[in-house]
Image: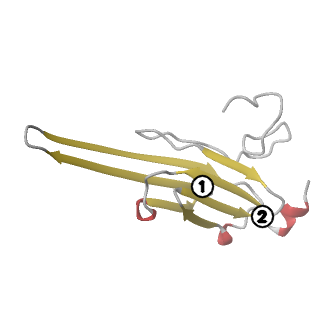
Amino acid sequence: EEFDRGFLRSPFRGSRLGIEPLLRRELSLGSTPPVDIVDKDTAYEITAELPGLDENNIDVKVANGMLTIKGEKKEEKEEKKKDYFLSERRYGSFERRFSIPEGVDTGKIEANFKKGVLTVTLPKTSEAKTAE
């Protein structure tokens, strides 16, 4: 995450021009999924890999200038054989938060989940599309 510090500035970290950062991550207990953030001409796109999660266990919210992605995974396994009994339980949750930059039309933010990949699209306003 610190690779671009000082050399190439990402629109998600802020810049020398005083632009507010899009990305502000807050860690919770457990591991956090990796995300890719792409600045396209018409929108920002956040993609998170969430293998093994079901759509019903993912929560995406927009409030107070923040985009929050939360998820929880519960896995239980039992195996009974003649000479042994195996029982395993694994639980985990995560939460990632991203500051929404100026120029995003928050009323049109969309989230799609397909084959373990969550894609959140933050469309830019027409003014933000034309600004350099």
Image location (x, y in percent) of residue 121:
67, 62
Q: Which residue is mark 1?
A: 66
Q: Which element is circle 2 on?
A: loop
User: In the picture provided, is 10 more to the left or to the right than 94?
Assistant: right
Please name which of the two marks, 2 or 1, marks the residue nearer to the observer: 2
> Relative to 10, does residue 64 appear above or below in the rendering?
below
Q: Amino acid at mark 1?
A: Met
Q: Which mark is residue 124?
A: 2
Q: Nearer the viewer, residue 81 or 50?
A: 81
Within 10 angstroms of label 2, few (less than 14), some, or many (20 or more) residues?
Answer: many
In the displayed structure image, the side of residue 97 where residue 9 appears, left or right = right
Question: Residue at point 81% right, 63% down?
Answer: 42
Q: Report which quarter residue 105 is drawn in.
A: bottom right
**Quadrant for the N terminus in the image:** top right
Name the residue at the front extreme.
Answer: 82
> Residue at horizontal 44%, vertical 53%?
71
